Image (cartoon, rainbow, N blue to C red):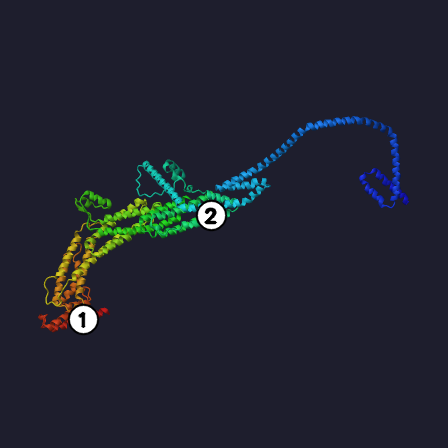
């Protein structure tokens, strides 16, 4: 069985060897050598080879004749083939010889084609590289010419559009490495330009502000002119309309841009001034730097830097000079800088997207407004020149209108102007105090003489005075008042004009202006003019005639207050009967001055009386009277008569509200008589007078009688009966008591309402009695006085002691 299987396996291997490709024989043979019967297989293989050799031999024997024939044919063909070969070799030789030139041409063509391919490839590469190089060259040129904004654009194009297409080249790598450096260089240079810009606008902000304020002034001037034209046309259209006064305030609205443009076209000569203030500034450094930082992703850094620097500049701009208050130019430069600063910020706000925002600008403006108001409040307080204050007011209004035109709120500035208005009024009050003082000091306190009609009308043009009787009198004639009346009245109107000047352009209503003028005028009347009048009345060496003339003058000024009311009403167009309208207090001012003058008249008369009484030289131990009044008293009575005669004959004394020569003259006369009576009585009671004789008392009685004769003669008309004599009633009853020695009646009727000596005070009576008693005792010792009473001397001394004792009893009873 094993040999059969081996034989079958060998047979199969042989079939595989016969039918398999020679490349696959190896595995087949390996299976033979792996077995143990490879010797037997070799025998089988040899047998198969011999078998195939026999078959080949049989086949060759079968085809041998054809083979021989073929060989014979081949031999024949060989000769022809040799000929063909020779001919081919010959043809090839000729072809080779002939093709050498063609080969050289083909080689040249090949080289040309290679060059063409290289050139085309080079052109393609250069087409990609040249734009990069050109853009880079442009970038270098822009950097050299400091055109950093286009340089940044070029850099962005090179980096994002050109270099990615040629990144395989080495020069592109160099360019790529240089891009961050170039970008940083552009950033630094743009920041340097921005710093130069900030420094430039800091230096030239006053010029920018000046231009802006000039433009605001031009707009306001043109607006005012247009308003005047409109009002003139309205007056022409309405012929029956009352004319508007020149001092009518103009509360005009800001001019529209359309109207401004029309006027600008007509006024070609001022075309340069029409340019906006921001046109004076080249803002391109800001825009470039903003764009550069935005592109580079550092916009926040730029915004913070810009705002920080501008805040620092704002603090510098808002710091006023120490001597700013000395001249208007100092204020003007301060305002120009502030306006220039905010004109720039407003332009930046509206031309950039978020570099500065509304909140930032409002914050800066709030800070600027508070610091500006504080600076103005401080520096304006040093000013004492009303003209400078008025010019400052116009400047502040222009400053406020300019900034309001750029959208900044300025209400606080107008509130400040109201404060400055109060200061301005105070300065005016001080200035007018000097004016009034000078007028009062240089006035002659005499009625104004008028020689002709022209002079008469001139005074009436200065002071509203109406008197039908004075109109009828022929020239020359006199006004009842002195020159200070029309001068003071004109100065009151000038003060009102000055107050009105400050109220213009403050955007106040007519009612507010009217209230302000009336309050200021009240201060002028009740404080300034009143103090000047009081000082003039109280000054030394002022005469009675001057005091009377002051009374007359103040009376007429009091009457003129209603004309001042009408004057203010015509200016402000606010009726005086408006609700809550302020009234003028001139009436009380002039009444107070008149009362002070009256009191001064009384005081001066009393002082004159005291001066005459100081000349009295009584001999208090005289034995008998001289029989005539004392010289000092005669002079005093003559002075009083002449004084009251002058009072009575002064012009302008009888008017509706005049008090001279009525109550003032009567009161002055009564006051003088009372003071004289009191002084004479005090003369008897002087402590240094220890003794009084009856002769001295009789001389004293003669002087008192002279005073009573003066009072009885009626030096001033208007007293009823013996009213003036009542001033001496106390002294008269005292003298009658001692001269008539009527002590029994006095003591018996004391305390009764209808007693004869009702006005004799027991204290005074006792004091005079004691002096008379001492005089009698002294004369008794010397036997020189009262000789006619020697026989009953002891009885009189006892009587005097008895009366004195009873008087003391009366005094004690009154005290209890």
Relative placement, left or right, of 657 versus 349 is left
Relative placement, left or right, of 729 versus 317 is left
Q: Which residue is mark 2?
A: 306
Q: Secondary structure at mark 2?
A: helix
Q: Residues within 10 Å of mark 1 (few under 14, many from 20)?
A: some
User: Foreground residue, 151 or 30?
Assistant: 30
Residue 432 in percent (x, y) is at 28, 50
Q: What is the quadrant of the C terminus in the image?
A: bottom left
User: Foreground residue, 473 or 453?
Assistant: 453
Q: How many marks?
A: 2
Q: What is the quadrant of the N terminus in the image?
A: top right
Q: Which residue is mark 1?
A: 806
Q: Given this view, does label 2 or label 1 mark the residue nearer the observer?
A: 2
Q: Is residue 177 visible?
A: yes
Q: Residues within 10 Å of mark 2 (few under 14, many from 20)?
A: some
What residue sits 76% from the left and 27% below the top? 85
Earlier-in-chain disc, 2 versus 1? 2
Q: Secondary structure at mark 1?
A: helix
Q: Which mark is residue 624?
A: none
Residue 465 in percent (x, y) is at 23, 46
């Amino acid at each position: 069985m094993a040999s059969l299987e081996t034989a079958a396996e060998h047979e199969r291997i042989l079939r595989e060897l016969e039918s398999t490709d020679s490349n696959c024989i190896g595995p087949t043979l390996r299976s033979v050598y792996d077995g143990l019967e490879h010797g037997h297989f070799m025998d089988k293989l040899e047998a198969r080879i011999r078998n195939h050799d026999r078959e080949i031999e049989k086949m060759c024997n079968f085809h041998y004749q054809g083979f021989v024939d073929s060989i014979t044919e081949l031999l024949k063909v060989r000769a022809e083939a040799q000929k063909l070969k020779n001919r081919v070799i010959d043809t090839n030789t000729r072809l080779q010889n002939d093709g050498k030139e063609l080969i050289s041409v083909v080689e040249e063509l090949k080289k040309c084609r290679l060059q063409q391919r290289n050139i085309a490839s080079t052109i393609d590469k250069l087409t990609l590289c040249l734009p990069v190089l050109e853009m880079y060259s442009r970038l270098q040129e822009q950097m050299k010419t400091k055109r950093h904004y286009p340089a940044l654009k070029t850099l962005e194009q090179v980096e994002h559009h050109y270099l990615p297409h040629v990144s395989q080249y080495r020069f592109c790598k160099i360019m790529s490495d240089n891009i961050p450096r170039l970008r940083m260089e552009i950033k630094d240079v743009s920041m340097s330009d921005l710093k130069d810009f900030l420094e430039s606008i800091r230096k030239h902000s006053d010029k920018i502000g000046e231009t802006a304020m000039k433009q605001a002034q031009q707009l306001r001037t043109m607006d005012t002119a247009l308003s005047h034209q409109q009002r003139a046309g309205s007056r022409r259209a309405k012929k029956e309309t009352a004319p508007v006064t020149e001092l009518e305030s103009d509360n005009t609205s800001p001019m529209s841009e359309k109207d401004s443009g029309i006027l600008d076209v007509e006024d070609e000569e001022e075309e340069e001034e029409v340019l906006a203030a921001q046109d004076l500034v080249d803002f391109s450094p800001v825009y470039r730097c903003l764009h550069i930082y935005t592109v580079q992703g550092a916009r926040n850094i730029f915004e913070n830097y810009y705002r920080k620097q501008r805040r620092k500049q704002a603090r510098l701009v808002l710091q006023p000079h120490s001597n700013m208050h000395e001249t208007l130019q100092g204020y003007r430069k301060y305002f120009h800088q502030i306006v220039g600063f905010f004109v720039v910020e407003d332009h930046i706000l509206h031309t950039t997207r978020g570099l500065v925002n509304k909140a930032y600008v409002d914050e800066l403006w709030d800070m600027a407004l508070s610091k500006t108001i504080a600076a103005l409040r401080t520096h304006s307080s040093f000013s004492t020149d009303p003209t400078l204050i008025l010019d400052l007011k116009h400047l502040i209004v222009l400053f406020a209108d300019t900034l309001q035109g750029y959208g900044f709120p300025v209400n606080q500035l107008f509130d400040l102007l109201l404060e400055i208005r109060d200061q301005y009024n105070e300065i005016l009050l001080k200035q007018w105090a000097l004016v009034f003082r000078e007028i009062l000091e240089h006035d002659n306190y005499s009625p104004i003489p008028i020689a002709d009609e022209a002079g008469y009308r001139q005074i009436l043009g200065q002071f509203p005075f109406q008197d039908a009787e004075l109109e009828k009198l022929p020239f020359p004639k006199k006004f009842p008042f002195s020159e200070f009346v029309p001068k003071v009245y004109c100065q009151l109107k000038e003060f009102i004009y000055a107050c009105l000047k400050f109220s213009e352009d403050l955007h106040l209503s007519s009612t507010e202006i009217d209230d302000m003028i009336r309050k200021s005028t009240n201060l002028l009347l009740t404080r300034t003019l009143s103090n000047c009048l009081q000082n003039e009345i109280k000054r030394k060496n002022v005469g009675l005639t001057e005091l009377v003339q002051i009374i007359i003058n103040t009376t007429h000024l009091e009457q003129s207050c209603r004309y001042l009311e009408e004057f203010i009403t015509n200016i402000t167009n606010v009726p005086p009967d408006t609700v809550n309208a302020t009234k003028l207090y001139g009436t009380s001012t002039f009444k107070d001055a008149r009362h002070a003058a009256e009191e001064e008249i009384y005081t001066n008369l009393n002082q004159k009386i005291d001066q005459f009484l100081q000349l009295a030289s009584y001999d208090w131990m005289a034995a008998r009277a001289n029989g005539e009044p004392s010289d000092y008293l005669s002079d005093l009575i003559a002075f009083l008569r002449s004084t009251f005669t002058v009072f009575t004959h002064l012009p302008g004394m009888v008017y509706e509200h005049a008090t001279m020569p009525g109550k003032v003259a009567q009161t002055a006369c009564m006051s003088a008589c009372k003071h004289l009576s009191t002084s004479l009585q005090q003369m008897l009671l002087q402590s240094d007078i220890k003794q009084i004789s009856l002769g001295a008392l009789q001389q004293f009685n003669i002087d008192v009688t002279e005073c009573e004769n003066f009072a009885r003669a009626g030096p001033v008309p208007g007293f009823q009966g013996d009213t003036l004599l009542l001033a001496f009633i106390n002294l008269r009853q005292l003298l009658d008591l001692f001269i008539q020695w009527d002590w029994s009646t006095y003591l018996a009727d004391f305390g009764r309402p209808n007693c004869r000596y009702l006005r004799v005070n027991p204290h005074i009576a006792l004091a005079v009695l004691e002096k008379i008693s001492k005089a009698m005792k002294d004369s008794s010792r010397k036997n020189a006085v009262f000789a006619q009473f020697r026989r009953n001397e002891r009885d009189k001394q006892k009587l005097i002691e008895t009366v004195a004792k009873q008087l003391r009893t009366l005094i004690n009873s009154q005290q209890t």
